[in-house]
Image (cartoon, helix red, strand yellow):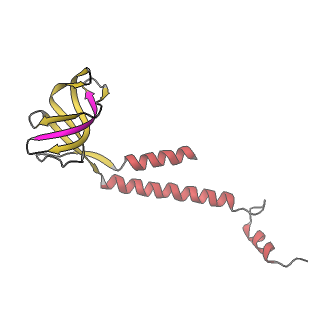
Amino acid sequence: MRSVLSLALLFTVNACYVYVPVGDTMPKPGKEIRAYLSPHQDFDVGRVTVRDVERIDGIVYTSSADTVAVFSNWLHQTFGRRFDSRRAVYYLTRDELGVLEERRIHPLRSAVSVVLGVGVFASVFTFVADAGGEQNNSGNKGDAQQGLSRPFR
């Protein structure tokens, strides 16, 4: 039962968000973004150089008409490896950006996840109510309630 609830909660939380290309505008500070680089670049992380980075995941620190500063979480290489960027701030110009995507709430997925979440909650509530509500072994609740209302003889 716990695994079903955990999966339902995980689906509900993750289904609500999607990354959408921002187009020509730069996102506002505080927005979570994915910056796809064109061409791929090398970045220094402490004493290590991460080569051939194709994507930076992070939060917009500042932005202007032609530059965005990303408070980064992850650096993704072309061949699939991901590196912790140690929360460095990288300044990227519009020429260095291929596609810039912003994390937003997806209305249809959110509605579906809410409906599924309510359905799971209702089924669990019904299961618990049925399992704990039986008063006798016959399963007939009416007899048990009538027995309590009769006077003792």
User: Left or right: 76 with respect to 64?
Assistant: right
| In the image, farthest residue toward the right | 153
The quarter of the rendered structure image containing the C terminus is bottom right
Indicate whether 146 appears above or below 61: below
How far from the left and from the top, in percent, is residue 13? 40, 49
The prevailing secondary structure element of the residues shown in magenta is: strand
Q: Is residue 112 above or below residue 140?
A: above
Left of 31 or right of it: where is 140?
right
Per the image, is 74 magenta?
Answer: yes
Seen in the picture, residue 40 relative to 110 is either above or below; the reply is above
The picture places residue 124, in percent across and down from the top left corner, at 57, 55
Measured as percent of width and height from the top left, residue 142 is found at: 74, 71
Question: Which residue is at a point 17% across and 26% down the rendered structure image?
Answer: 40
Residue at the spot x=47%, y=48% of the render? Answer: 8
Q: Quadrant of residue 107?
A: bottom left
Q: Nearer the viewer, residue 1 or 61?
A: 61
Q: Nearer the viewer, residue 101 or 65?
A: 65
* Closer to us: 92 or 98: 92
Residue depicted at x 73% and y 67%: 141
Left or right: residue 87 versus residue 68 is right
Q: Which residues are magenta?
A: 67-76
Does residue 20 belong to the magenta stretch?
A: no
